[in-house]
Structure formats: structure tokens, C-alpha cells
Amino acid sequence: MTGDSHGPFGLVLLDPKARTGAPSDDGFRERLADWLLFMVPMFIAEQRHATADEIDRARSDALEQIASHGDDLQFGGRYQSSSRTALAKGFAVLARAEGGVTALGVHACTAPHPYCPGERATTPDLCETMK
């Protein structure tokens, strides 16, 4: 972990630009986002000292699980738990990339970067720059 990191759990937060569900929505997106907020930091910490080969294996495993059973993740089924876990592990892997990952209403990153939703000061004020 370097001085330029967000710590052992990274930075995982709701994306302020994410749209909230419609009133008729069943709340799936919000519940999934809440679950990711809880699980992704744990997987970031778990992968903190992983080698490049271990990260590549985690990426491949998550990809395989989500591609094979993504419908169970959303609609329930025999593989719902393992698919959700694979999604959280995939977020943890992607959080290591420059700029992190923003998807499904959640942003995750392991190091500070420009325009990070968690760093308000880095986001330019377009009203000020237009003057």
C-alpha cells in the first residue's frame, strides 16, 4: 500500500450521478448497490497483496460466473449467491485500475484520481470555468 492509496479497503461509495429507481421499481438496484457497498471493500482488502497472476485468476473466475449465471444474480436462482459474490470480486479487481470503476450506482477505486466522486475538490465547477 502506497501513500497515494485509499487504504486497505479502498474507496467505495454510491455514485452521486446515478439515477434512483422509478417509484414502481422493486428496489433491486438500490439493494444491490447497498450490498456492493458492504462487500467490495472486503474483497479489495482480500486482494490487496495479490500477485498479478492471482488478480488475473480472480478476474477470469468472476467473468465466468457472471457470464454463466448473471440471470440468477438479477432474478434469483440456484447461483444467485455465487454470482453476487463474483460481481463484488469483479468490482474489487476493477477498482485497482486507474480511475477505478463506476457501475450499477457504485464507484470503487483504490487510489486517488481526477474526478473521483469521493473527492469533491477534484471535480471542476463548470460555472466557474465558463467565466
Image (spheres, rainbow, N blue to C red):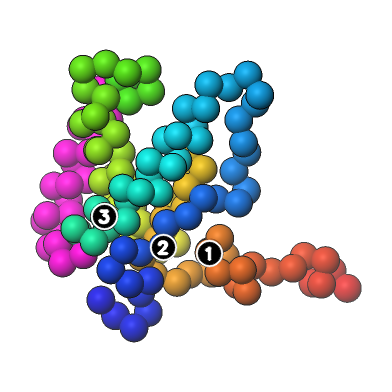
Residue in the image at 25% along x and 38% along y: 85
In the image, residue 54 lies in the stretch drawn in magenta: yes
Name the quarter where the N terminus is drawn: bottom left
Q: Which residues are magenta?
A: 48-70
Q: Secondary structure at mark 3?
A: helix
Left or right, 12 with respect to 86, comes to right
Viewer-side residue, 57 vs 33: 33
Residue 118 circle label: 1
Instruction: Return the x and y of residue 30 as percentages of the image width and height.
Output: 50, 35
Q: Earlier in the sequence, mark 3 or mark 1?
A: 3
Left or right, 116 with respect to 38, comes to right
Q: Secondary structure at mark 1?
A: loop
Say which residue label 3 marks.
Answer: 42
Task: Measure the alpha-carbon separation of dots 2 and 3.
Answer: 11 Å
Residue in the image at 42% along x and 35% along y: 32
Instruction: Return the x and y of residue 74 as percentages of the image width and height.
Output: 38, 23
Residue in the image at 40% along x and 49% along y: 37
Task: Measure the alpha-carbon separation of dots 1 and 2.
Answer: 7 Å
Q: Quadrant of residue 50?
A: bottom left
Outermost residue, bottom side: 3
